[in-house]
Every structure is written in C-alpha cells, then in structure tokens.
Amino acid sequence: MSLPLARIVAGPANAPTLVLLHGITGSAVSQAEAIDHWVGRGYRVVAADARGHGLSPRWTTAELDRAGEVLVEDVVSLLEELIPAVPGTPASPAVGDATREFCGAARVSPAFAAKAVNPVAGESGEPESTPAAPGPRPVLIGHSMGAATAMVVAVRRPDLVSGAVLLDPARYGSRSPQELRERGAARKRARAADLADLPGAVARALANPEIPDGEAVAGAWAGQRVDPSLLDTGVVAPPVPWEEAMADLAVPTLLVTGDRPGSARVGPAGLDRLARIANPRIETALLAGAGHDVRRTRPEEFWAAVDPWLDRLLGAGEQ
C-alpha cells in the first residue's frame, strides 16, 4: 500500500480548508508565502508534496507507467483523508443549491516564511490524519501540474471539493510526447547543474526579483528533491485533454493566467477557447504582465483576483 503524501498543515482547525498543489519540481514549503497569506486571512491550509517531490514517496516503475493518473489518485486519497466520515456532515457545496447559486453568477472576466509551516507527523514519521472540520469541502488551489491535477480531481470527484482555483494549468495535449520528454530532460539537466553548485543555485534564486525571499531557499531545496524518474517521463498533467476537462467542470472554478509571451500556458488564446466552451461555472482572471507563475510574477494583482473569489465561495476571509 502506498504511503500518504507529505504535507504542511497550518491555520485554525475549524476554518475553511484550502488544499495547495504545487507544480513540477516544486514542493509544499516552496509556497510558504501563500500559506502565510491564507492562514492570515483565516483559512486552514493543507499544502501537499506531490509524489516524487519534497518528502512524499518516490515513484515506483509501475506508477511511472501511469504517472498522470497516480497524481489524481494521490489527491483524491488526500481529500478523502481530510473529510471526516461522520454522518450528518453537511453536503459539499459542489453538489448543493449553494453551488448552483454561486455558479449562476460566474462569468468570464477581464484582468482584474509561514508561521505554522510544520509537517504533521506521528512517532512513525508518517503524516498523521488531519481531517477537516465539518462544513464546506476543501477548495483545491493548484499551479501548473498541480492545477491540471486539481482540474481532473474536481471533474471526477466533485463530492470532495467546494471548488477549484487553477493557476495557469499545464494543458495535456498541447505538446507532443517527444517535446514533453525533451522538456523533462532539460529540467533534469538543470537539476543536476544546481546540485553541483548549491550555493550558486540559492544565490540565483535570491537574486531573482520574482521569487519571494521566503521561498528562494525552499525552492532550491525542492528542485533537488524531485524524483528524476518522473522528469524522464515528461509527465506534467493527467492524460485528460484540457478543454474537455474544463467543459466538464461542475464546481465553481477560477482560472488565473497571464499574458507574458513564451511563459503563460493558457494566456489570452486559452481564455478565448474557454469563452467558446461557455461553462457557467468557470470564472477567469487575466493578469497583465504575469508569467506562468502568476502568483510570484504579479502578487498584488493575484491576491486581488483570488481572495475575493475564495471569500465569496467559502465565507471566510480576513478576520
């Protein structure tokens, strides 16, 4: 039986829960500023290390053969662990009238170091169960690979989530398998170069104005912790076409992207495709000048787009 994903848990135990899913070569702790921010606004944050990242289990050969599906299964298992199996627990807004009301207002819109960041572990060193309090189901917030995974989880298991925030998701089918393997090989070479000069890797991260100081060292560490065998596959998303999944989403969803050429994965062209799909449950935010990492490249605009949406969905927000 596979071990559970490692995770960071911070914030009030009885608060609405946000589940953070990072991108390829990232980790839970490399999102420290986001964890701090949302805990400060009254949320409970569970930031998970994806399989083969951070302190989570490594990939087996059998798992690598179906890596995209395993990413989805891991998040489903995490959500099932977080949600208490208690009779009478309120139904997820994802399947109730509240969601239909929220989604009815959805529209495609124009641009508009953590205090409690500690892994929860028992004496065995494995993460303890950290069930959410009865109430709204968690909201998935994913970036890139994490966003693609969150999207598919929300499509397949809407009973487990209240909604999803997709930060410039990786789009399955937009690159050939050969191109994906080449990009994976490039990431592997970059990882090896950083490993050969860790002080230089940290210095470069600290010098990058678009990487928060509180995440620079953690990001360099995360890059070293990624399982090279996953990079060999080139997998960065579950094997579900992006437009198909977006059309099938039945929970409130916010997609955030940028317009920086050569960086943003969805961008204005992707938003045009979404407009044609016309799923009323999806809202979008286009952040002018933002790159693929929308939170880091345009932080003020990012919080201004995401926080009100979360507050409206979950009724939390800064206390």
Image (cartoon, helix red, strand yellow):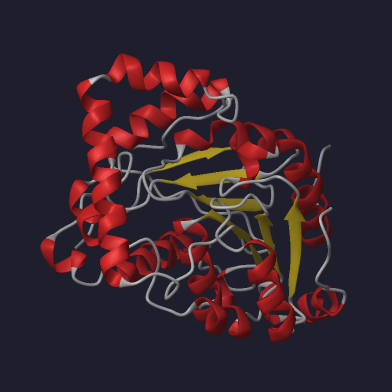
Q: Quadrant of residue 284?
A: bottom right
Residue 312 or 239: which is nearer the viewer?
239
Residue 104 image-quadrant placement: bottom right
| Left or right of residue 209, residue 202 in this image | left
- Across and down, in percent, residue 56 comes to 30, 46
Give whichever of 190, 165 is nearer the camera: 190
Q: Is residue 22 visible?
A: yes
Which of the 4 image quarters holds residue 217?
top left
Quick one: 249 or 287, which is closer to the camera? 287
Query: Which quadrant does the N terminus fall into?
Result: bottom left
The C terminus: image quadrant: top right
Residue drawn at (36%, 64%), measured in percent from left and top?
Answer: 71
Vertical relation: 70 (above or below) 211: below
Q: Left or right? Give the position of 300 relative to 186.
A: right
**Residue at (71%, 71%) from the top-left corner?**
252
148 on left or right of 182: right
**Residue 88 on image: x %, y %:** 64, 73
Picture coordinates of residue 226, whole percent (x, y): 28, 43
Q: Residue placed at 33% from the left, 36% from the top?
A: 223
- Count how many numbered circles sit on residues in the image: 0
What residue occupies the far left of the structure in this picture? 61
Q: Position of residue 112 (x, y in %)?
A: 84, 53
Name the residue located 43 percent from the left edge and 21 percent from the top edge. Answer: 204
- In this view of the protein, can residue 12 be seen by the observer? no
